[in-house]
Image (spheres, coloured by chain):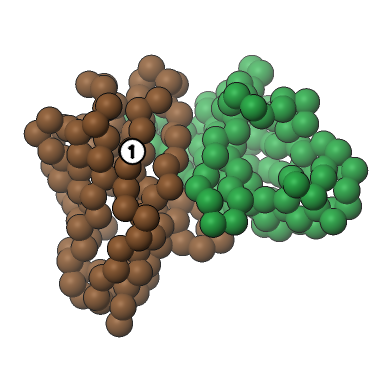
Chain colours: A green, B brown
Amino acid sequence: GAVVSQHPSWVICKSGTSVKIECRSLDFQATTMFWYRQFPKQSLMLMATSNEGSKATYEQGVEKDKFLINHASLTLSTLTVTSAHPEDSSFYICSARATYTLLDEQYFGPGTRLTVT
Amino acid sequence: DAKTTQPNSMESNEEEPVHLPCNHSTISGTDYIHWYRQLPSQGPEYVIHGLTSNVNNRMASLAIAEDRKSSTLILHRATLRDAAVYYCILRGEYNFNKFYFGSGTKLNVKP
C-alpha cells in the first residue's frame, strides 16, 4: 500500500524558535497533501490543504503566517511552525491524497510530536 | 460540512464481531463514507469506504443504510490489535475532498 513518512517523528524546541516538519509520499505522487493537528485525547483538526506548485489553503482560524506550508514537489510537503510557543505543542499529522487509483484515498503519515519548552 | 455522530466508546470481547455505528443524516448524494482508525500516537489508518452499496475488504465490512443516513462498520472477529479510535468521515467532492474528523469511537477489546 501507499506509504507516507514524516520527519522528524518527534522534536523538542525552545519557545520562539521555528521548526520544520517534512511529509513525504514514498511510493506515489501526491498533488494534494493535508496537514492536521491533534491535541491529547482530541480528534484530528484539519489545518490546511497543500497543493503542489501553488499556495496552501488554510482552514478558518489557522494562522498562515505562523504555519508555513510549502509543497515543492509531488512527493514532499513541509510545515514550518514559526516562533513556536508552548501552546503549539501538539501531534502534527500529514496525509497525502493518492489519485492514481480509483480509490482516491488519503494515506496518513505516522505523525510528528512537537513539544515547545 | 456534513457531520457524523458516533458513540464515544464501545467494548467488545476478543474474537467476537463488533458493529460500530455512525449517523450522518445530512449526507449529500455525492458524499463518500470513509472509515479510518487510529492507534495511540500513530496516524490514522484506512479501513474501508463506500458510497451506496455495502463493501467488504480484508479488514472489515461496511453496511450502508438504504437512505444513506447511517452506516455500520463491522469487524467480523475483533482482536486485541483492533483496539483503536474509529472515525467515520464523509468525503465530498464539493469540499475538495477534505476530511473533517469527528470525535470517533474508542473501541476497547477485552481478552
Q: Is residue B55 above or below residue A117?
A: above
Q: Is residue A64 above or below residue A77?
A: above
Q: Residue at x 13, y 38 (%)?
A: B65
Q: Residues within 10 Å of mark 1 (few under 14, many from 20)?
A: many
Q: Residue at x 40, y 25 (%)?
A: B1
Residue B11: horizontal and vertical position, in percent?
Answer: 29, 68
Is residue A26 left or right of B3 when viewed as pictured? Answer: right
Identify the subunit bearing mark 1.
B
Residue B21: horizontal and vertical position, in percent?
Answer: 23, 50
Q: Which residue is mark 1?
A: B4
Which corner quadrant of the image does residue A113 belong to? bottom right
Residue A9: horizontal and vertical position, in percent?
Answer: 67, 57
Is residue A72 left or right of B82 when viewed as pictured? Answer: right
Residue A8 visible from this viewpoint: no
Which corner quadrant of the image does residue B12 belong to? bottom left
Q: Is residue B5 above or below residue B80?
A: above
Is residue A93 left or right of A66 when viewed as pictured? Answer: left
Q: Residue at x 35, y 60 (%)?
A: B9
Q: Is residue B39 above or below residue A27?
A: below
Which corner quadrant of the image does residue B38 belong to? bottom left
Q: Looking at the picture, which amino acid does disc 1 mark?
A: Thr
